[in-house]
Amino acid sequence: MTVRTYRSTDSGASALTLNNTAGNLIAVLDAVLKNGYSLGTVSSITRSGSTVTVTLSAAHGLADKGNMITISGCTQTEYNGEFAITVISTTAFTYAVSGTPATPATGLPAAAKAGSGWTKPYSGTNLAAYKQGTGSNGFYLYVDDTGTTAARGFGYETMSSISDTSGNAFPTAAQVAGGLYLSKSNGATNRAWIVVATEKDFYFWVDYTGTVTAANISFFGDFPSYVAGSDIYNTAFLAGTIAGFAAGNGAEGVGASGMNSYLTGNYVARSYTNTGTSIAIQKSNDAAFAPSNSTSGSNGETYPSPVTGGLLISPVYINEFSAFVRRGVMPGCLSPLHNKPLTHLDTFDGTGDYSGKTFLALTCYNSGQLFLEVSNTR
């Protein structure tokens, strides 16, 4: 899998506004899941040893870490491909190249963020069905973006048209009438957003109110399962049961209050038995001293840890609420066991079991915090 990170601050995302307008969440999802977007005009591509420097004609807006960039159009084909890059200035970044292609590059060089390998087989007016990509369960996320402050959604195991609702929905209509909420903006102001995606899954962070500490994080996709043998229904949809916030409603789905206790708005396609229909799930972490319904990263041990002197982290586990069994973990997602230990948008490199991985700190609902992997290593 390739981990790709997309931000509303990227130069190519400037047209992907997210406010209380019907259809604009679908425009964002089209770009990040399927189409990708250009980063602007390339001024030059040069090489020194194995290091390639790409200079754009205007600011690229890219964050320091977590970017996969596709280079195309170079006559010297060694320059072309998708690469993890290092930002060196507001208009330039570098990557490593194999071989010794002529420098500077010639042809019609272009730089872009590619889509995440999903398809959009069915659509309608402000309606879309996205299908997971290679290596996944191949399930569908149906999005109804006819609303303003939020879109609605269901997961489906199968679909044959944009109106086909027969493919075992998660949640079912009986569980959440009208589907889960994917919040956009509580007003006309454009909100910041970040998507971290692979061919199998994506996280969607949006600053719904413009206050950061009340931001939403939703999730759709496959998760690593503990089921021995084959688990072909390990696809989850975590979002809200209303637009915005209310106690126990699922809020932002992934890191909302309710860590270590049951919370609505979190569903998986079927049980670990691979039978039945949609079931509710619960998230948990390894916090020993936090309240049972704690928001991820909203309290816990003093940071840095008075015992280890470091940052304590935990996987975010997926538990089946009705069966009281642990099914698996949220992919590339960690819960800090402190009270919001890092600044929003900080990045850090892991050690030990997480060596070679880079994580992005995202502040979210109720002043909580989650860490999402943005390195291309899972």
Image (tube, grey):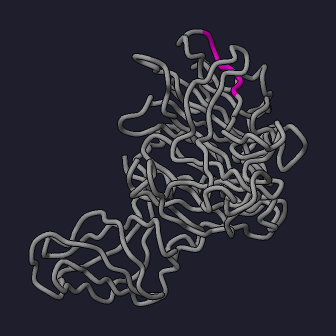
Total labels drawn:
0
Q: Residue at x 53, y 37 (%)?
A: 221
Image spot of residue 159 (x, y percent): 52, 26
Residue extending farthest to the right is 247
Of residues 70 and 223, the one nearer the viewer is 223
Q: Is residue 155 left or right of residue 368?
A: left
Is residue 279 magenta-colored? yes
Estimate the x, y position of residue 70 in percent, counting from the top left. Answer: 33, 66
Residue drawn at x 62%, y 29% is 163
Q: Is residue 146 visible?
A: no
Q: Is residue 23 magenta?
A: no
- Image spot of residue 224 (x, y percent): 48, 33
Image position of 175 with respect to 128: above or below: above
In-front residue for pair 215/160:
215
Q: Is residue 335 above or below residue 95?
A: above
Considering depth in this image, is 343 or 16 the residue closer to the camera? 343
Quadrant in the picture for residue 311: bottom right
Kindly identify the residue that appears in the image at 71 percent across and 46 percent down: 255
Outermost residue to the front: 307
* Magenta-colored span: 276-281
Q: Where 61 sits versus 264, above or below? A: below
- The foreground one among 309 and 343 is 309
Above or below, 13 against 375 in this view is below
Task: Let me know if residue 193 appears in the view.
Answer: yes
The percent coordinates of residue 50 (x first, y second) are 18, 77
The part of the image, by quadrant, that contains residue 133 is top left
Q: Is residue 33 left or right of residue 147?
A: left
